[in-house]
Amino acid sequence: LAEARSHFGSSRAAQRAAKNTHFYSLSSPPSFATMVLKTDLCAYSEYRIYPGRGSRFVARDGKVSFLLNAKVTSLFHQRIKAVKLRWTQAWRRMNKKGKTDDSAKKKTRKAKKFQKAVVGMSVEDLQKKKAMKTQIREQAKEQAAKEAKARAAKAKAKPAAKSAGPKAKGAAAPKVPKGGAGGGGGAKKDFKARK
C-alpha cells in the first residue's frame, strides 16, 4: 500500500488501486465455484438445451417434448423425421458417424479347421487321401471329358442316319400351315354369339 500511496498521491486513489490489482500466490490459486447448469436434451435434434432456451410442447396424449428453437419446433410439427436431416444426432447415429466404440464392435472369429479321425480311418490316412484326391479328380475330369466327346460323336452319327430315311417319306407329303388349311390365320372366332 505504501508504494501505491506514493504512486497515486492520495490515500483514496491508493485504496482503489489496491482493490483492482490482484496478487495471487503460486501455492494457493483462487478458488472459483463452478456453477452447475441443468441442461435438457432436445427431443428432435438431441442437442443440449441450456436454461432460458427452448420450449416445451405437450401433445394430446400427455407426452412432453422439449424443443431447442423455432427451426426444430417447425420441423417437429411438420412431422419431418429427424433421421432424414443430416445435422441431427439421429442421422449421425443411423449413418455411423462420430464416436465408434471399439468394444461395441463385434469381433468375428474364423472357425479353425482341424481334422478329426473317422471310425475306421486315422488322421494320417485321411490326410493321405486328401492329398491323392487332387490327382484322382484331374484324372476323373479327363475321363469324363473323353466320355462326353464320345457321346456327342455317337449322338451326331445317329440323327444323321435316321434323318436320311424320313426325308424321302416327308417329300411326298405336302406341307400344311400351322393354322390349318385355310391359310392366313384361320377362321375368325365369334365371341358375341355365345349361347
Image (cartoon, rainbow, N blue to C red):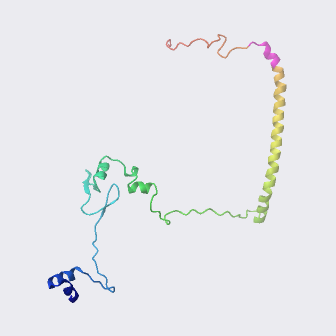
Q: Residue at x 55, y 63 (%)?
A: 107
Coordinates of residue 182 in the picture (x, y in percent):
64, 10
Q: Residue at x 25, y 56 (%)?
A: 56
- Residue 124 location, quadrant: bottom right
Q: Which residues are magenta?
A: 167-174
Looking at the image, residue 169 lies above or below residue 96? above
Query: Extreme bottom residue here?
Result: 2
Nearest the eye: 122 or 170: 170
Looking at the image, residue 176 lies above or below residue 23? above
Q: Most prominent secondary structure in the magenta stretch?
A: helix
Coordinates of residue 189 in the picture (x, y in percent):
55, 13
Q: How many marks?
A: 0
Left/right of residue 110 with respect to residue 105 in the rendered view: right
Nearest the eye: 179 or 6: 6
Nearest the eye: 143 or 90: 90
Q: Residue at x 83, y 34 (%)?
A: 153
- Residue 108 location, quadrant: bottom right
- Residue 171 lies in the magenta stretch: yes
- Residue 172 location, quadrant: top right
Nearest the eye: 16 or 70: 16
Coordinates of residue 171 in the picture (x, y in percent):
79, 15
- Residue 58 lies in the magenta stretch: no
Q: Residue at x 81, y 43 (%)?
A: 145
Coordinates of residue 2 in the picture (x, y in percent):
21, 89
User: Which quarter of the rendered picture does the N terminus lie within?
Assistant: bottom left
Left/right of residue 142 with respect to residue 49 in the rendered view: right
Looking at the image, residue 78 lies above or below residue 101? above
Left/right of residue 20 with respect to residue 173 in the rendered view: left
